[in-house]
Image (cartoon, rainbow, N blue to C red):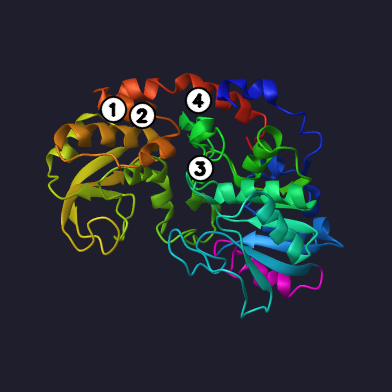
Amino acid sequence: MEVTDMTLSRRTLLATTAVVTAAAGGSAQAAADAGGRLRTGFERLAAGGYAPLAGQRVGVVTNPTGITRDVRHLVDVMHADDRVDLTAVFGPEHGFRGTAQAGGSQGRYDDPATGLPVYDTYLKSGQPLADVFTASGVDTVVFDIQDAGARFYTYIWTLFDCMEAARLAGRRFVVLDRPNPVTGRAALGPVLHKEFATFVGREPIAQAHGMTVAELARLFNGEFLTAPVELETVPMTGWRRSDFYDASGLPWVPPSPNMPTPETALVYSGTCLFEGTNLSEGRGTTRPFELLGAEGVDGRWAAAANEAGLPGVRLREAYFAPTFSKFQGKTVGGVQLHVHDRAAFDPVRTGIALLVTARRVWDGFAWRPDNWIDKLTGSTRVRTMIDAGADTDEVVAGWQAELAAFRRVRRQYLLYR
């Protein structure tokens, strides 16, 4: 489906999608307007005695980020609470307890801490994943994973796949909301073209979507699932769209091994594009996605990037030696991003400017042979325009019409001002 057709194809879903707000008293937005302390979807679910889960055998899709404010895992909390019948756990990429690196999972096993069966969802979708839900015996599937705010961060597609599988298996689906760590102010960047759909982008949303996982679930249900799943969302209270993660007061748990801090998430939706090149995106360093470089790159890149006048960020000439991934054990030259004004910083524009300037100043620049950049950006446009000599403004201008269309659809599914 083309992005420009999204409004025409929208289902009248909002009337059939439950938004649970009464469990902790009052509406999510009222509490946010009152400046109350942020309460996650899980905090509100527990405070309301797990009412939406009453009489249900429950399975949870989660990872190490599914924690309480005092850093207990929600699986451990729910397992110890007689008010909820937790019978299964479903682990995504990196696993439920987080023991696997990128591209890995933990497989099927019994959790040593609780004795609960843990089922592997990674790289499963459609009927095979529906069969996992059926075999587990659960009535309701609950999702609680911290997102990073980018289309190619795969947990949102775990959400999508699990929603579709729950529909196929005839299971209810409940999403417990958490903050978008880089705010929910606006959607940025190119929109995926459907023919480029992969696990780093199943459906046509913007590169930086500016939504929470509960809002994305509503969007997926209304626009993209084959048919709607029985969906309930438990929103946060006390969260505003302009809030960065540190305003939440919540502890940060890396949602994946190369997302160590909220600052990583801040740049990720732009600098992850370097996965599609022969430059290091900083994997194997203590600053993944903030450090970028390759053998033969020197200070000319930082100078050229700073001349681009990118708002909110300065680029420093940097040298580093990755301990794994690209250029393992070799000293490479490049840049480090230093964001000094988060509100002004545009990660996607910054990522494009860094691609444009890297290609201009380093004659060794190349795209990955599999054109992975097209999967990340959602079409051939960014790659072909940069190869043709387009500057940053021209590349960014190329996606504005489809971004405006996505923003119009997105507004219908937002839960917070």
Q: Is residue 16 visible?
A: yes
In the rendered image, residue 79 lying in the magenta stretch gets the answer: yes
Q: Nearer the viewer, mark 1 or mark 3?
A: 3
The residue that label 3 is drawn on is 198
Position of residue 291 in the picture relative to residue 34 (left or right): left
Badge 4 or badge 2: first in the primary sequence: 2
Secondary structure beneath dot 4 equals helix
Q: Amino acid at mark 1?
A: Ile
Q: Which residue lies most toward the right here?
A: 55
Q: CA distance from mark 2 to mark 3?
A: 17 Å
Q: Position of residue 371 (x, y in %)?
A: 35, 38
Q: Alpha-carbon distance for marks 4 and 1?
A: 19 Å
Q: Quadrant of residue 363?
A: top left
How far apart are the two marked residues, 4 and 2, measured between alpha carbons?
A: 14 Å
Q: Which disc is residue 382 wearing?
A: 2
Q: In the rendering, which numbered label is found on residue 403?
A: 4
Mark-to-mark CA distance, 2 and 1: 6 Å
